């Protein structure tokens, strides 16, 4: 983990970027001369994974307890 990164600010920036890409409002290039606009091609799944990681690191840096594993419990049924 890098010490100089503000993970909460990074999570907020990633959340804004994710929502912009999801809604289709993010543009990679805009021109006013010929009215050109190009949409970005980004993987929402990768961006969401980065967002979740930044949120986890933000919670850890603020002293919050983060649940990392969800284990299934086994039960025996008498037949």
Image (cartoon, helix red, strand yellow):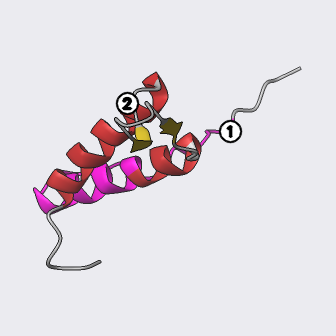
Where, by quadrant of the figure, is residue 35 drawn? top left
Q: Mark on residue 25?
A: none
Q: Residue at x 44, y 23 (%)?
A: 23
Q: Mark on residue 74?
A: 1
Label 2 neighbour load within 10 Å: few <14, some 14-19, many 20+: some
Left or right: where does residue 27 sit relative to residue 44?
A: left
Secondary structure beneath label 2:
helix
* Position above or below: 30 against 6: above
Residue 61 among magenta residues: yes
Front one among 6 and 65: 6
Q: Residue at x 47, y 48 (%)?
A: 47
For the magenta stretch, what is the residue range? 51-74
Measured as percent of width and height from the top left, residue 51 is found at 38, 48
Residue 59 among magenta residues: yes
* Position above or below: 74 against 49: above
> Looking at the figure, which quarter contains the N terminus?
bottom left
Residue labelled with disc 2: 19
Q: Residue at x 15, y 53 (%)?
A: 9
């Amino acid at each position: 983990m890098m010490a100089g990164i503000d993970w909460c600010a990074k999570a907020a920036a990633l959340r804004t970027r994710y929502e912009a890409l999801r809604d289709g409002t993010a543009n990679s290039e805009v021109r006013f001369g010929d009215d050109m606009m190009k949409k970005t091609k980004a993987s929402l799944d990768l961006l969401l994974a980065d967002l979740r990681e930044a949120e986890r690191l933000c919670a850890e840096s603020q002293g919050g307890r983060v649940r990392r594993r969800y284990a299934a419990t086994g039960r025996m049924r008498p037949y």
